Structures are given as structure tokens and as C-alpha cells.
Image (cartoon, helix red, strand yellow):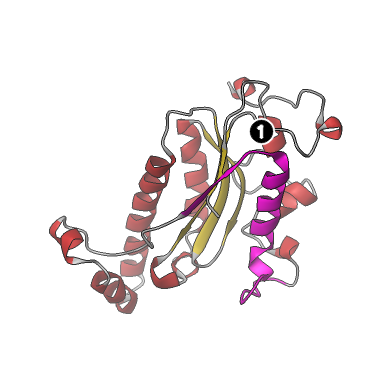
């Protein structure tokens, strides 16, 4: 079934032009933990996120690149199903992740963090029985229309672990929770991961969205 959506480029990777239009919907998005707390790191949620990458393939959304930071996630995806709203994909993912993070914090006795997250819930959300604020409400979403921009976004997210205040590795290729080595060295990924070039279709142009 994978052959239905994993198609080769029309003329191969060597013949591709930087300005070519990408033919299917790609989505690069980011969501951030509440108050930028390092909840992913504290709860060691990485393998759970890898499982989520697997789960979203059931909605025909495929992981094409990622970096999991201590407090936020960047993810480049491809979808063969343009009817699925990205807001729903992100919303469902955040809800499941939020429950798992709260559960792990409770089991590890991090009541200090749970209180901060509880205090962050506004009155209207409390009336809807929301108990903890796990993620920031907003997320970034940008449309990408060319391979050039896809490469730029992959380069940006892959270098995130050594950018700005982050010093998570000596070299960005050494950071464990990233697709960088998959793209640069061709190493086997630790999770469900598809090279974006293999998912470019010969069909009519669709937009690529970047949430980064």
C-alpha cells in the first residue's frame, strides 16, 4: 500500500530543479510546552512521540523530518489526504500527549509542575473540566511551495539543538532526537520516517505548510 504514495521524482533527484513546485501537501509544524517548560525532557516522552509519528500514518500523514526539543517539537509532514485539517491533526496529537505528560508527572511526583499547569487553566476552560495547561495555545504554520523552502526548513529544524541558547550537542548531527542523520548520512531512522523527495507526486500542485 505504501507504493501508492511513495513515488519517485519524475526525473530522479539529480535532475530536480530548485524552483520546482512540490506536488502534494506538506506540513511543517511546531507546538510548544506550557510556559516553555522542558516537559518533553522531564517526562522522557520521546518514544511516545515516535509512536505518535507511527499513529498519524493511519490518517495518511507521513513524517518527513523532525526534531524533538526539550520543550517543543518541529515536524515536517506529508499528507496524501487533503481533507484532513491540520488543526485537527495537531489538536488530537496534543490532547493525547497532554494526557500522557500529566500521567507521567503524577507518577513521578512532580506536583510542583502540575500546580503551575493547573494554575494556567483559565476560568472558561475550567468550566469545561480542563485540569492542566500542558501546551501553549498557538502554533506556527507556514505554507511551503518549493523544494528549496523544504530544504531550508529541514536545515533550520535540524540545527535547532545547537542554535541560540540551546547547546544540546557539539554538532547538530549528534543530537539524538532528530532526523538530521537520516538526511545527511542516510542512517536508518529510529521512528517512522519518509524522505520528502520520495513523496513528491506527479499530480497537480498542492501547498506545503510549515509550522516552525
User: Which stretch is magenta?
Assistant: 140-169
- Residue 179 seen by the camera: no
Q: Position of residue 56 (x, y in %)?
A: 47, 38
Quadrant in which the N terminus appears: top right
Total number of numbered discs in the rendering: 1
Q: Is residue 168 magenta?
A: yes
Q: Is residue 16 left or right of residue 182?
A: right
129 vs 91, left or right, is: left
Q: Measuring 24% from the left and 66% from the top, which residue is drawn there?
A: 121
Secondary structure, mark 1, is loop
For the residue carrying disc 1, how many other residues have a C-alpha within 10 Å: few (<14), some (14-19), or many (20+)?
many
Residue at the spot of label 1:
22
Quadrant of the snapshot with the C terminus: bottom right
Percent position of residue 199, x then y: 66, 31
Please name whichever residue, 35 or 131, is drawn nearer the observer in this view of the structure.
35
Residue that sits furthest to the right in the current view:
14
For the point 33% across and 63% down, the residue is 102
* Residue 11 vertical placement versus 211 (above, below): above
- Which percent across, then down, holds residue 141? 50, 50
- Compared to 12, does 45 lie above or below? below
> Looking at the image, which is closer to me, 116 or 139?
139
> In the displayed structure, does residue 26 sit left or right of residue 17?
left
Amino acid at each position: 500500500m505504501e507504493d501508492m504514495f511513495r513515488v519517485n521524482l519524475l526525473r530522479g533527484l539529480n535532475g530536480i530543479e530548485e524552483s520546482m513546485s512540490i506536488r502534494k501537501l506538506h506540513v511543517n509544524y511546531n507546538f510548544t510546552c506550557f510556559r516553555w517548560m522542558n516537559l518533553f525532557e522531564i517526562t522522557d516522552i520521546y518514544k511516545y512521540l515516535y509512536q505518535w509519528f507511527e499513529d498519524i500514518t493511519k490518517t495518511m500523514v507521513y513524517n518527513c523530518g523532525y526534531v524533538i526539543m526539550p520543550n517543543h517539537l518541529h515536524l515536517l509532514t506529508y499528507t496524501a489526504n487533503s481533507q484532513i485539517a491540520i488543526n485537527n491533526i495537531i489538536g488530537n496529537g496534543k490532547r493525547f500527549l497532554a494526557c500522557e505528560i500529566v500521567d507521567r508527572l503524577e507518577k513521578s511526583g512532580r506536583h510542583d509542575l502540575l500546580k503551575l499547569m493547573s494554575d494556567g487553566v483559565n476560568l472558561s476552560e475550567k468550566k469545561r473540566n480542563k485540569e492542566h495547561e500542558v501546551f501553549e495555545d498557538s502554533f506556527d504554520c507556514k505554507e511551503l511551495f518549493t523544494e528549496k523552502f523544504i530544504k531550508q526548513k529541514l536545515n533550520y529544524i535540524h540545527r535547532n539543538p545547537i542554535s541560540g541558547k540551546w547547546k544540546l550537542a557539539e554538532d547538530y548531527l549528534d543530537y539524538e532526537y532528530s532526523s538530521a542523520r537520516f538526511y545527511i548520512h542516510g542512517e536508518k531512522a529510529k521512528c517512522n520516517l519518509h524522505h520528502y523527495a520520495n513523496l513528491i507526486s506527479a499530480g497537480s500542485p498542492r501547498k506545503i505548510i510549515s509550522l516552525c
